[in-house]
Image (cartoon, helix red, strand yellow):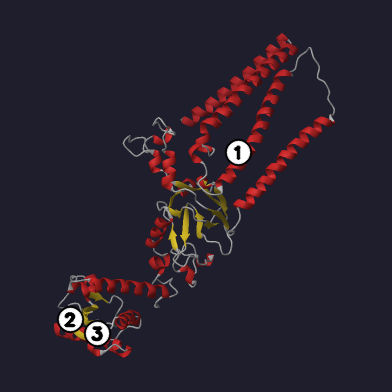
Amino acid sequence: MTGLIAVLCIVLITLVVVQIGKVTELATKIRGEQDAQEEANNWSANFFLAFLFIFLFACIASAVYYKNDMLGYGPHIAASEHGPTLDYLFNLTLFFTGIVFIITHIFLFWFSYKYRGRRDRKALFFPHDNKLEVIWTAVPAIVMTLLVVGGLDAWNEVMADVGPDEEHIEIEATGVQFAWTMRYPGPDGALGTKYFKNITPINALGLDFNDEKCLDDIISSAAGEVIKLPVGKKVRVRITARDVLHNFDIPHFRVKMDAIPGLPTYFVFTPSITTEEYRDRLGSLKNDGTPMYPEWHEPYDPEDPESKKRYEEFYFELACAELCGKGHYSMRRIIDVVSEEEWKEWMDDQKSFYMTSIRGTDEDPHKGKLLDIEIKERRMDFNTKVEKALAATELTEKIIRLDHVNFETGSARLTALSRYELNNLFDFLNKNQNVTVELAGHTDNVGEPEANIILSDDRANAVYDYLLNKGVAADRMTVVGYGDTQPIESNDTAEGRQQNRRTEFKILTQ
């Protein structure tokens, strides 16, 4: 029904227009064509004159009204070190083009009014004027030359890549319908290689895990995850896309670069202000205590007057500036610029994609091996535990579990990878010659208690023999098998039984 009504309305409007045309044609014949033409010229001239003032006023008024929100003035001056260069170039271009726009606008519509067609005058044929030609060719050429030279200078400054030894942080942004996947380097400070043929449902970026630099890379892909950046630190962003053309756009930083499938691009910038400092700018007050920017003091949630103010919830924003599909709007990611110390703390809490999603799976090329990074992490964890135990006063706090000492099922034969944990224990005993320890074995409650005592004792002796062969004196170690008599978890679950099957050592003297 709605469609039918719409069609009928269009037909009716068409009939009205046709009838008006016929009436106008009839009126013209009655009044005379010259009179009608002159009246039409006068109406057009007056409309052009009105348009001159209305349009010019609307352009200037809208620019003033939206300057803080859309043109980068007021509180939204650039938040990066290169931003002021682009803003200056923009303002310089706007100054010259604005003058030309206003003058051309006035001349264009005033000419249409002044020289409208009339019966009492005749148009003058004006063939050529060399002086005028030189003026309106030379002046724009000079201005354009200055703008182009300034633009090239700004381009060379803004688009310069980092030097080979220049300190910076390199991250990667990959656009995909409809999200940004961010990749940070791990402790090694380098991003690993990737190859599109490695892409799988789990490994969406196609990282090559045979490259050691990939093993500690950190990936952030969820829309709600915050992108953290340190203030005052140069950031180089590798920009690419996996499907269609996207655009990496951070307006507050004056950063904008296409993300092109198969053709990596980059952008280098340095955040110059933290998120908190930017919020303070938005929420600043005048000398009389009133808001300098009232629109930022409105409630963040219009339906909840008690919600925080808009400036208190502000974040920098990464968006896609290409119409990449129906879900284009959902590519918004928020950016939080913090101090370098806070950024380092945040990075320390991040887990590598390989260790959390790939390690031990069928896609892991290092399955069954212990990596250097794991050996280092285990050593650091072990050293932290023994330092805490040495400082403890309670005997129960001097018991340290050997989490990575394992045995073949149902036997006292150490697995090959257990040597790394046992080497950590040897290094500790070798460094602290006054320390004596008790080596203890424990089992779950599966099987006969007597058999469990024997198995736990055999496993503790296996650790004893390993340390003895490494050079630890026999009188510094005692061996005890507790069997299933000292569980730390319930034996009613598989997880609990696994926790109870353990090997420990207790610091007796130090």
Q: Give the residue drawn at x 21%, y 83%.
A: 456
**Residue 329 shows up from this direction:** yes
Q: Classify 340 as above or below 146.
A: below
Q: Classify 449 as above or below 292.
A: below
Q: Give the residue drawn at x 58%, y 42%.
A: 87
Tell me the tag on residue 464: none
What separation in Å lies between label 3 and label 1 (alpha carbons)?
77 Å
Judging by the rendered image, the residue that carries numbered circle 3 is: 459
What separation in Å lies between label 2 and label 3 (alpha carbons)?
10 Å
Tell me the element at label 2. Answer: strand
Judging by the rendered image, the residue that carries numbered circle 1 is: 91
Q: Earlier in the sequence, mark 2 or mark 3?
A: 3
In percent of width and height, residue 188 lies at: 46, 67
Q: Nearer the viewer, residue 137 or 356?
A: 137
Q: Earlier in the sequence, mark 2 or mark 1?
A: 1
Q: Are marks 2 and 3 in contact (CB under 8 Å)?
A: no
Judging by the rendered image, the residue that carries numbered circle 2 is: 483
What separation in Å lies between label 2 and label 1 (alpha carbons)?
80 Å
In percent of width and height, residue 226 lies at: 41, 52
Q: Nearer the viewer, mark 3 or mark 1?
A: 1
